[in-house]
Image (cartoon, rainbow, N blue to C red):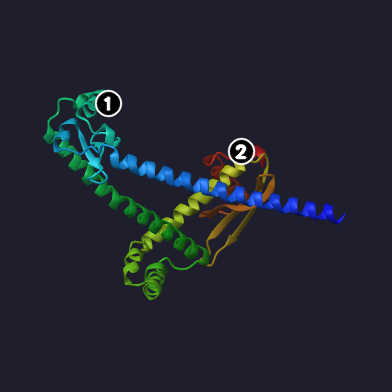
Amino acid sequence: MDQWLKTGTIKKLDQVGETIHLTSTSQDLTKDLVQHTENAQSSVLQNGKKREYIDEYVKYGFSYVGDFDYPKPKCIVCGEVLSNSCMKPSLLLRHLETKHVDYKNKECDFFKRLARNNENTLILTSYIKPANKDNQNAIEASYCISYRIAKCGKNHTIAENLISPCIKDTVQCMFGEENVKKINSIPLSNNTISRRIQDMSEDIELTVIDRINKSKIFAIQVDESTDVTNFAVLLVIARYLNNNEIEENVLLCHLLSEHTTGEDIFNAIDCYFKKMSINWSNC
């Protein structure tokens, strides 16, 4: 029994040692293979022929990009970048004749002017894109502030007289003077806030009408009252289905300038329904 245990233990230890030896051997082989591959790649790069760019290649419509020691030809017309091995007059001429036949007989000055125009366009585009993005963000901020003003029922001049100075002071204290210039691009004048609120109001109205027309049935609740200036105001609230859920929104707020009889109220609602193409049969 003792002999069997000893023999089994020794066999197991031998197997473990052999496994460790194989693992270390495979790791060494992997390292040698990686090192050999890296050496082969470096030798190829060192022994490979690097073609240089010559100014005469402009007549074929090509400039270069990348390092001057290892340049890559770039087509001035279409902007395609070729490999360094294509830096041959025959291959460059073939690209020009194959893809840009109309530019085949152009002179070097033409391609030089075209290259300068492309560089100027890239520079101008790099300035225009951030400017457009900042302009979009400024308009979005203007709509957000207008929404808050309309929701609170405040005077439209509060944006220019109070909100804008507060934002500038906050940004200057938290982020520095250089970021205050971006705040100045947010349009917050009295007329601008009025237009923003009007735009949002029209968008909400069209959204509600679209949902009413898509709903199979809808109901309205009508209320006529007098405001603080003794003007009769007609208020119409619509209830409809939106994604199989009951939704309720203000549909119409109309000033009754003449009489406030039932006929006048019905005519006002009927005229609005016809204008917005709302079907009475679904009511």
The answer to which image quadrant residue 273 occupies is: top right
Work out whether residue 222 or residue 190 is closer to the camera in this orientation and state it.
Answer: 190
In the depicted structure, whether residue 232 falls above or below residue 239: below
Residue 254: where, in percent of width, then height?
A: 53, 53
Q: How many marks?
A: 2
Residue 117, numbered circle: none
Label 1: element kind:
helix
In the depicted structure, whether residue 74 falls above or below residue 207: above
Residue 188: where, in percent of width, then height?
A: 37, 63
Which residue occupies the extreme right position in the image?
A: 1
Q: Is residue 185 left or right of residue 249?
A: left
Q: Residue at x 38, y 41 (%)?
A: 40
Q: Amino acid at mark 1?
A: Lys
Which residue occupies the extreme front position in the image?
A: 3
The answer to which image quadrant residue 193 occupies is: bottom left
Q: Residue at x 49, y 64 (%)?
A: 148
Q: Which residue is tagged 2?
A: 279
- Quadrant assignment for the C terminus: top right
Label 1 and label 2: CA atoms lie apart by 59 Å
Work out whether residue 92 or residue 244 is closer to the camera in this orientation and state it.
Answer: 92
- Is residue 79 at least partly visible in the picture? no
Residue 14: where, in percent of width, then height?
A: 70, 51
